Amino acid sequence: MALRSSRELVSRLAGRLSRPAGTAVALALVASVLVAAASTAPAETVAAPISVIIDTDPGTDDAMAILLALASPELDVKAFTVVPGNVTADQALDNTLRLVSLAGRCDIPVAGGAQRPLAQKLITAEFVHGENGLGDIELPASDCEADARFAPDLIIEMIHAMPGRITLVPVGPLTNIALALHKDPTIVPLVKEVVVMGGSITEGNVTAVAEANIYNDPEAAQAVFHAGWKVTMVGLDVTHKTNFGAPHLERLAATRGTLNDFATEVMQFLIDLSAQFGADGTPMHDPLAVGVAIDSSFVRTRHMRVEVETKGEFTRGQTVGNRYNMVERNEIEGDRLKMTGIDRVEPNAWVAVEVDADRFLSFFLERMAGL
Ligand code: BDR
Ligand code: CA
């Protein structure tokens, strides 16, 4: 007899017994059955879905990340909070609402947040994401309405409502997360984890060393990396290895449906764009961060101290990873500094340094097939 829960067992047994005593007797019987079962059979554990808030700036690859999250039963998406980055705040909010509507998920709150970065002008990237941020693919107007709450407030509220259970997945500039942190630092120990798409310890995609999400709000990023919560950094070191090319597109195109057709068009747009710059395929930045929130074994991480450069003439926005968590100690001696030892620095981030790209891309395609 396959039973989904002890409640189902109670109701079946109660149905066979006379009421009103039926339920009480059934409960007693169930208790003894469960005790016996516990001693004879291995417990069947079904992991509860991971509650996530996805902070996003759609954005072509953001759109793919959103679809991946919605297609993944391991995740319970509590909210989408919207940040400007790839496009303006208004455009990003409109895009998120259209996507959520297309997926038939108006039940998930979508809240707008910051209008600009903390300390610099907004930099948008329609050049990369299309004029509308979705590869110039027009989605139908949304049936969903924006949540009235300010995104950082909604983040704070949900974290307090579910202490220890929320994983934040920011896949845009870190402005909303930093604002939430600044307004209510007590959220830090209540957050399960922060999986950031951003940064790099090897290369940049805006400058030689800076990645776009960090470059677009370095002050916010520095605050998020130093908050004291668990940060996993899914940066270009790994996302650049998740190359989605023609063979993947062929598999995606074979999966039909409104969402699938949209995904195929977006990925075609990105592949064509990459081809203009001589690249064969396109990286899956934001989807990989969602993938890591689902299954951390897609990447191998190293625990290190990450500082975000906020001043350098050539390095603003760089995530500087201290691979050995050590710095030289220098002390004044006369008119010079003399090295007197080595100090340890506390690691603050789990930096993804390797990725099982093939497994992740297959996972992404399987999930898209199930949309
Ligand atoms: C990141 O920047 C944006 O263009 C993408 O959406 C992604 O979040 C990659 O550097
Ligand atoms: Ca993004």
Image (tube, rainbow, N blue to C red):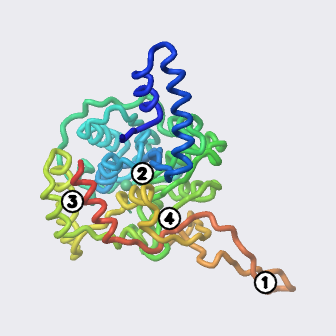
Mark 2 — residue?
122
Q: CA distance from mark 3 to mark 4?
A: 28 Å
| Label whose residue precedes the other's in the sequence (1 or 2) | 2
Q: Residue at x 21, y 59 (%)?
A: 267
- Give the residue type that dot 2 points to: Leu
**Mark 4 Cα-neighbour bin, 10 Å: few <14, some 14–19, many ≥20:** many
- Give the residue type that dot 1 points to: Gly
Residue 102 x %, y %: 23, 39
Vertical comparison of 9 with 66: above or below = above
Q: Residue at x 49, y 56 (%)?
A: 195
Mark 1 — residue?
341
**Mark 3 Cα-neighbour bin, 10 Å: few <14, some 14–19, many ≥20:** many
Confirm or reject: label 1 Cβ below 8 Å from ligand 1: no
Mark 4 — residue?
317
Q: CA distance from mark 2 to mark 4?
A: 14 Å
* SS type, badge 1: strand
In which quadrant of this rendering is ligand 2 seen?
A: bottom left
- Give the residue type that dot 3 points to: Met
Assess whether mark 3 and mark 2 are in contact (beta carbons under 8 angstroms).
no
| Label whose residue precedes the other's in the sequence (3 or 4) | 3
- Nearer the observer: mark 1 or 3; the answer is 3
- Nearer the observer: mark 2 or 4; the answer is 4
- Nearer the observer: mark 1 or 2; the answer is 1
Vertical comparison of 16 with 215: above or below = above
Mark 3 — residue?
267
Confirm or reject: label 3 Cβ below 8 Å from ligand 1: no
| Label whose residue precedes the other's in the sequence (2 or 4) | 2
